[in-house]
């Protein structure tokens, strides 16, 4: 059953209650909800709007069984009605994506030819040079693709949870086997998998998190942060 907008969970509730779901019911995710989930992720932030992410939506049971084999035999992959394969395309900028992004910007009245020329220079420098513009350090393109894809991936996860679904992000898989099973080109990187559905059985207990004082610093590394709401 579709969870209508009026029944959507508050984001603060979603952040507080989300757990990685261990088992799923077979109840399908309606197309309308799946479209909302996917659309949310595709609106995620992206440097120069390059959008290197690509997603394979796996719903057919036979394909979920194939994916399970390629993903350390995790039962939840076969159980969940939807599993997303999150991929990063690392060469799209030089295969037409950059020019398409510029065309989109032009059509939407964003920027001008001076800005577009700057995009071309900066993107080419970042990806192609030995010393990129970030502190003179050569860019790690795989890391760049992973960062961007995970922003979109996580946005989809939060939207699914907001709509009342349960999720399980997964990083346990054989990348080569996933590519082979789903005809994913060799130059594409597999970043993560996301199972979406309704959980079967009890949810996981909250395992706890480090306190803010352990992981958040003020102004420089190691200096404690003091906030009026947490003091």
Image: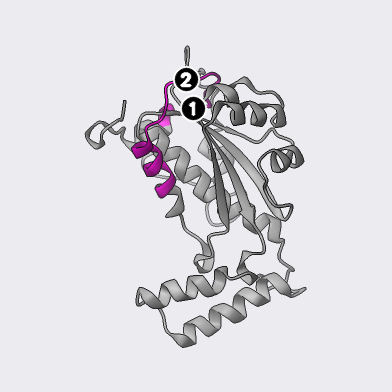
Given contact means CB atoms under 8 Å apart, are the residues at marks 1 and 2 in contact? yes
Q: Is residue 28 magenta?
A: yes
Q: Residues within 10 Å of mark 2 (few under 14, many from 20)?
A: some
Residue that mark 2 sits on: 26
| Viewer-nearest residue: 34 or 18 | 34
Q: What residue is rendered at 71% in x and 32% in y?
A: 70
Q: Residues within 10 Å of mark 1 (few under 14, many from 20)?
A: many
Tell me if residue 47 comes above or below residue 84 in the rendering: below
Q: Which mark is residue 81?
A: 1
| Relative image position of residue 25 (x, y in whole percent) | 47, 18
Q: What residue is rendered at 36% in x and 37% in y?
A: 33
Q: Secondary structure at mark 2?
A: loop
Q: Earlier in the sequence, mark 1 or mark 2?
A: 2
Residue with the most extreme left position: 6
Tell me if residue 223 comes above or below residue 115 in the rendering: above
Instruction: Give the quadrant of the C terminus.
Output: top left
| Relative image position of residue 16 (x, y in whole percent) | 41, 30
Magenta-drawn segment: 16-39
| Viewer-nearest residue: 137 or 129 | 129
Q: Is residue 110 visible?
A: no
Q: Is residue 215 left or right of residue 190?
A: left
| Relative image position of residue 99 (x, y in whole percent) | 54, 75
Instruction: Give the quadrant of the N terminus.
Output: top left
């Amino acid at each position: 059953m579709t969870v209508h907008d009026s029944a959507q969970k508050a984001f603060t509730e979603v952040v507080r209650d989300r757990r990685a779901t261990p088992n799923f019911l077979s109840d399908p995710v309606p197309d309308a909800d799946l479209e909302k989930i996917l659309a949310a992720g595709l609106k995620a932030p992206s440097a120069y709007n390059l959008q290197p992410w690509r997603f394979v939506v796996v719903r057919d049971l036979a394909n979920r069984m194939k994916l399970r084999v390629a993903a350390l035999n995790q039962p939840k992959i076969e159980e969940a009605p939807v599993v997303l394969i999150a991929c990063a395309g690392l060469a799209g900028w030089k295969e037409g994506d950059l020019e398409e992004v510029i065309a989109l910007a032009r059509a939407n009245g964003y920027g001008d030819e001076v800005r577009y020329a700057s995009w071309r220079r900066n993107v080419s420098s970042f990806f192609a040079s030995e010393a990129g513009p970030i502190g003179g350090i050569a860019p790690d393109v795989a890391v760049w693709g992973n960062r961007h894809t995970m922003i979109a991936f996580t946005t989809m996860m939060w939207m699914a949870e907001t709509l009342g679904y349960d999720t399980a992000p997964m990083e346990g898989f054989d990348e080569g086997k996933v590519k082979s099973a789903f005809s994913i080109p060799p130059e594409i990187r597999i970043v993560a998998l996301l199972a979406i559905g309704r959980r079967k059985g009890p949810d996981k207990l909250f395992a706890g998190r480090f306190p803010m004082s352990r992981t958040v610093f003020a102004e420089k590394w190691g200096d404690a942060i003091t906030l009026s709401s947490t003091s």
